[in-house]
Image: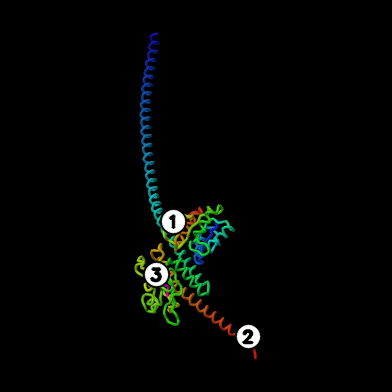
Amino acid sequence: MPNILVVEDSPTMRQLISFAMKRISNSRVIEATDGVDALKKLSSDTIDLILCDINMPVMDGLKLVSLVRGNPTFKDIPIIMVTTEGAEEDRKRAIAIGANAYLPKPIQTQELIKMVNTYLGGSGS
Amino acid sequence: MVEKETSYLNKAEEFIQMFKKGEEFTKDILRENEKLRFRVAQLEETVERSGDEARTKLYDERIRLLELELNSLKDKFIEVEEENKDFASKYLGVEEENNNLANLYVASYQLHSTLDFSEVLRIVVEIVINLIGAEQFAVMLIDDKTNDLIAVATEGIHASETLRIKIGEGIIGRVTKEGESYFAEDLSVMHDFNAFEPIVCIPLKIKEHVIGVISIYKLLTQKSGFTNVDYELFNLLAGHAATAIFSSRLYTQSERKLTTIQGFLDLLKDKPKR
């Protein structure tokens, strides 16, 4: 059962992503409202994939990615950025910091599911 | 003695004659046998030939039937392939519809999840950013006192930049007056910000009563145009956001009034008796 951590300050987006993730068989969604909350959830749960926004209060997504990549326990967890920042330089920066993939909002649910399945090693739903 | 000799000679002659006859007979039999063998060979050849022809005919018939079956299977395969394609495209359509409904459900659920006015405005802003993909926009409501439109929430622009807009004035004023959504013809042309020239303007309506508008001035870089679900979301916002904003504003006002009245009552209760 893959555990997916959704890090997003917007309740609307959290609910929408959680909805989409329900379509991935046996997945469990754990929600976090910002980077600090995400680090707490990473310590208390076994996480298989992180879906992360960039613009968030307290700790933004890019800082979270760099902290996750710098931690030997979490460094191999795939991270997909889901953000309103659609410029190419933003994408490059996120990938350079350690994100595996970059998905600009508004998201296409099918694309998100396909991407998550790719990083979870699944065949798609 | 001579008689005996003659008798022996006659017998010998008889024997020779018999022997000749026997020879003749044997030759006849051999000839007949040869003829029969030839005939048998002929018959065998005929039978064999007729067997081959029958087999060939049978094979030809079988080939013809197999070809018919193959063609029918080919036709069926094409038919099934077409059906498959049709199902695949239907499946994609259902998937898309499903995703769109999920978006609408989430938007609607969030809009009606609170009675706090500022919280409702925050949710409207979230929906317009995250689900529609707008970068610059304003939520404007009709001011009860002046009857002008004023911004109550903005994104990407400062509230002061949106100015006050009179009902009937410009695109926004006209949308407020007529209650019909406005979509610029070419969304790819992004002008510098102009408070009077949105690319999209959606009236917030409770039945036919317009309480305000959502004016979008710029879309996110990655958003090149609107999809069907965007128009559905605009419709949803026009109705549900209006109801949520209106009811939360009334609730907040009534809460405030209740607190004031409660304060008065407490003051009256606490008033020392003379």
Pick whichever, B149 or B107, lies toward us. B149
x%, y% of residue A39?
56, 59
Magenta stretch contains residue B216: yes
Q: Nearer the viewer, mark 1 or mark 3?
A: 1
State the mark number for residue B270. Answer: 2
Give SS at disc 1. Answer: helix
Q: Chain of mark 2?
A: B
- Residue B164 falls inside the magenta stretch: no
Find out whether the residues at labels 1 and 3 contact each other: C-beta distance under 8 Å: no
Q: Earlier in the sequence, mark 3 or mark 2?
A: 3
Q: Residues within 10 Å of mark 1 (few under 14, many from 20)?
A: few
Q: Are marks 1 and 3 on the same chain?
A: no
Q: Is residue B154 visible?
A: yes
Quadrant housing residue B174: bottom left
Residue closest to the eye, B10 or B213: B213
Residue at x-position 55% and y-position 54% = A71
Q: Main secondary structure of the magenta part?
A: strand
Which contiguous range is marked in magenta? Answer: B213-218
Residue highlighted by disc 3: B217
Q: Chain of mark 1?
A: A
The amino acid at mark 1 is Lys
Q: Is residue B249 left or right of residue B173?
A: right
Residue A119: x and y in percent read 49, 54
Q: Image point 41% across, 60% down: which residue?
A: A87
Residue A1 appears at what percent x and percent y?
A: 56, 56
